[in-house]
Image (cartoon, grey):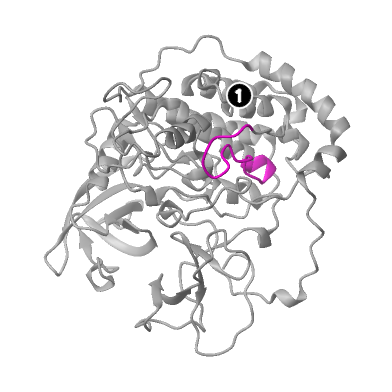
Amino acid sequence: MLLDDMPQPGTTVGPWLILERMDSGSFGVVFRARRAGHPEAPPVALKMARAPRDPRFLREAELLQRVRHPSAPQYEDQGLWTAPNGHRYPYVVMEWVEGFTLYDWFREQARSSRELLSVLAQVAGALAAAHACGAVHRDVKGDNIRVTAAGRAVLVDWGSGWFAGAHPLTDTTAPPGTGAYRPPEQKAFMWHFRKELEERWSSQPSDDLYSLGVVLYRCVTGVYLPPCTDGGEPVEREVLPPSAMATLCPELEALTLRLLSEDKEVRGTGGQLAREAAVLAQTTGPEADRPILPTSSAIATEKEGQVPPVSSASEELSDTERGSPPSEPSDTSTQPERPRRRSFTEALLSTSLAGMMGGLVVVLAVELLRPGPPEPEPAPSLTTREVPAPFSTDGGVAEEALSSVENLPSVGVPYESLGAQMPKKPYPWQRKPPCDRGETTISGGCWVRVWGEEPPCGPKMFDHEKGCYKPSTDMPRAPTSGEP
């Protein structure tokens, strides 16, 4: 869909009046809209495909109608919009969720373990509702969780989801998702069947629960888990308990480590997790009210160890407004030199005593919160034919381009160590379209790709769709730093 073909503010799409364009990604564009002729009506999010008759949007509409839960966006409508060129583009309309992404919410002010337990209970409830109707989200991550000012947590962007009976859309071995959040058994499958193009990973509720564990771990510690592969074949890894890097209550740590278990049965079910987190949010002692802050032993590391990053379309295409407006770039020349980053071994040595004591607490807490036999919870029947145990197959959907590592700067991680998000609008000094050859038009500005660089792109470049970009300009400018 060309820029001129998109619906403009003030036009109608079906019964909906377009108010403004909010966000865009590889597969669609998000608009804020409201019902035409009803100025008192609340705003909605209208998500329109970039490609005519894109079946992804029919699937997302179907999922939103199946998953009825306060922590999932409420479905409103779907339809086809005829562009001036005569092409018909599908769209889906859902509740407008005003709030921060989870990581932004966590950074906005000091949050406590009790607050995070409340968010966890709500998101787990949405997953339980999805799993109960044979659906999986398949892209649970911090950027897809919104927290409103009232504390309501909503799991958004169901476009990568799957449900039993859904028609396959792609033929990739791995389903859509985000690299750092994939469970180890899925990565082992991807390696085992890397040469078997007909095999498909069977997406399961336990995948979503593991991803939610990664969300908690990164939210609290500010870092991803160590990689479970060396760029290919799975390897053994040692995961530091969150208490080695941040202050949190033992109950929250135990739940996090349980979700990160390499034994998927230990993760339990979404329903169990929702109930346990809700009870703990109400009954845990005063320690849960302490703010979660980095400890002196916190390790500032890059994304998920050293896993090669890939950009995420879903980081650009969201169902809600971003938490903060863009700001002008700042000069890095006045920034103080950052302290030397300690190695993993140095951190372990410096925290040995604390780790020994914290480990005992974690082990006891994990055993106390270890679930019994999982309750019956319908899981998608995805196997298409027999493959060597313990693997099974399913029909994948969406594009592998959705696989990514998020590059949102997070608590405990220096902003300079991660790539900056692509701004929603061009800088005042940036070249505007039409762009020259070799330049790319992104969010209304001209950008130059830095070949040979991959996300996260560092402090002077911006991450976008598997590449690193710099804004194009006709004159020298000061270097940029931080999020635009």
Residue located at (82% from left, 59% from top): 339
233 relative position to 67: left or right? right
- Relative depth, front residue between 7 and 351: 351
Which residue is farthest top?
373
Which residue is farthest left?
86
**Picture quarter containing residue 324?**
bottom right
Residue located at (79% from left, 21% from top): 360
Residue located at (26% from left, 25% from top): 384
The kind of residue tagged 1 is Arg
Q: Quadrant of the C terminus?
A: bottom right
| x then y, percent, for residue 320 | 43, 52
Extent of the magenta region: 218-236
Magenta stretch containing residue 113, yes or no?
Answer: no
Does residue 213 show up? yes
184 shown above or below 303? above
Which residue is farthest front?
195
87 relative position to 200: left or right? left
Report crowding for label 1: few under 14, some 14 to 19, many 20 or more residues within 10 A (C-alpha).
many
**Picture quarter containing residue 476?**
bottom right
Does residue 96 show up? no
| x then y, percent, for residue 49 | 26, 56
| x then y, percent, for residue 111 | 68, 42
431 shown above or below 410? below
| x then y, percent, for residue 211 | 51, 35
Q: Judging from the image, what secondary structure is the residue with disc 1 in?
A: helix
Secondary structure mostly seen in the magenta stretch = loop
Residue located at (46% from left, 59% from top): 466
Residue under label 1? 258
